[in-house]
């Protein structure tokens, strides 16, 4: 589990600092602030933020548009344009880049919060569609290698790699992570299974999905994930062993 990491690309440092303070007070992790295009690219590559707040005009040029194109070409992640300009010319240039949000200065903390929540949802819904059950039926969002779980007023990021197993909890799916934290996803286990990468998670029992990469041992009745012992149904054992052999 981790806070959502945000990169701020804004050349007016007073605005950038104010934005950073507002985001951190909301519970987000501001991992970098810059007003330079080249440095923004470097921070993006090195720090891998979850979302970027991008001023369209950096200096006297609209280099924020160039940075947005770099995001789309190399990182495929949500970004929000932050600008003082809402004129037709600027919007016409920004629209083809498909930002996940557009925020006009000056804005409040509530504006920031709303923009980020909508941007994450927009980005999740804009990802290539499959025949899987839409997770949009829940407040929780699957984005690339993680699920963003609604927790109070914020989304909490849980990477697939950090999940040990998933089990049912009433009408919810309960995720157990490597840091011994439990998260509830607002959908039944079967529906959540449809959202997970099939090569990574396998059902060992009608009530358990396990992260194959975290399995440390198997016997006739259990799989072992570190100190944890998970039931292994006889109808699942041979297929699990076969799958592990293929992946090894």
Image (tube, grey):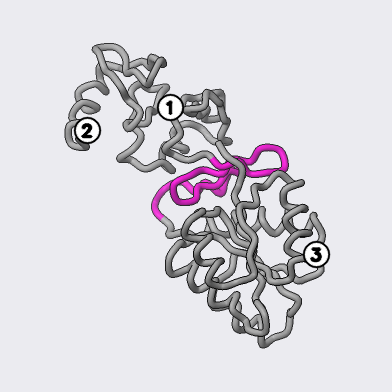
Tell whether 53 sits left or right of 216.
right
In the image, the segment drawn in magenta is: 130-157
Is 111 in front, or is 236? Answer: 111
Residue 23 falls within the magenta-colored stretch? no
Q: Earlier in the sequence, mark 3 or mark 2?
A: 3
Residue 107: mark in rendering: 3
- Give the SS element for disc 3: loop
Residue at left 22%, top 31%?
244
- Residue marked by disc 1: 165
Q: Residue at x 41, y 41 (%)?
A: 196
Q: The C terminus lies in which quarter of the figure?
A: top left
Q: Residue 145 colored magenta?
A: yes
Q: Nearer the viewer, residue 231 or 70?
A: 70
Residue named by callout 2: 243
Q: Residue furthest bottom?
A: 89
In percent of width and height, residue 33 lies at 64, 60
Classify the position of the N terminus by image quarter: top right
Mark 2 or 1, nearer chain start? 1
């Amino acid at each position: 589990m981790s806070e959502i990491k945000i990169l701020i690309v804004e050349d007016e440092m007073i605005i950038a600092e104010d934005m950073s303070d507002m985001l951190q007070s909301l519970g987000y992790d501001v991992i970098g602030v810059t007003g330079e295009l080249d440095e923004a690219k470097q921070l993006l590559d090195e720090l891998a933020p979850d979302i970027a707040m991008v001023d369209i005009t950096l200096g006297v040029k609209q280099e924020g548009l160039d940075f947005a194109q770099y995001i789309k070409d190399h990182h495929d992640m949500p970004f929000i344009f932050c600008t003082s300009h809402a004129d037709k010319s600027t919007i016409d240039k920004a629209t083809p880049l498909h930002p996940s949000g557009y925020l006009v200065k000056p804005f409040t903390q509530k504006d920031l919060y709303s923009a980020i929540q909508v941007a994450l949802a927009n980005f999740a819904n804009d990802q290539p569609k499959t025949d899987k059950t839409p997770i949009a039926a829940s407040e929780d969002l699957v984005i690339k290698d993680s699920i963003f779980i609604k927790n109070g007023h914020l989304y909490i990021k849980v990477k697939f790699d950090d999940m040990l197993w998933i089990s049912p909890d009433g009408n919810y799916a309960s995720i157990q992570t490597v840091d011994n934290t439990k998260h509830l996803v607002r959908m039944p286990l079967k529906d959540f299974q449809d959202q997970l990468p099939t090569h990574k998670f396998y059902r060992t029992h009608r009530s358990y999905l396990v992260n194959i990469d975290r399995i440390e041992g198997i016997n006739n009745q259990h799989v072992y994930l570190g100190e944890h012992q998970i039931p292994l149904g006889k109808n699942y054992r041979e297929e699990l062993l076969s799958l592990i052999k293929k992946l090894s």
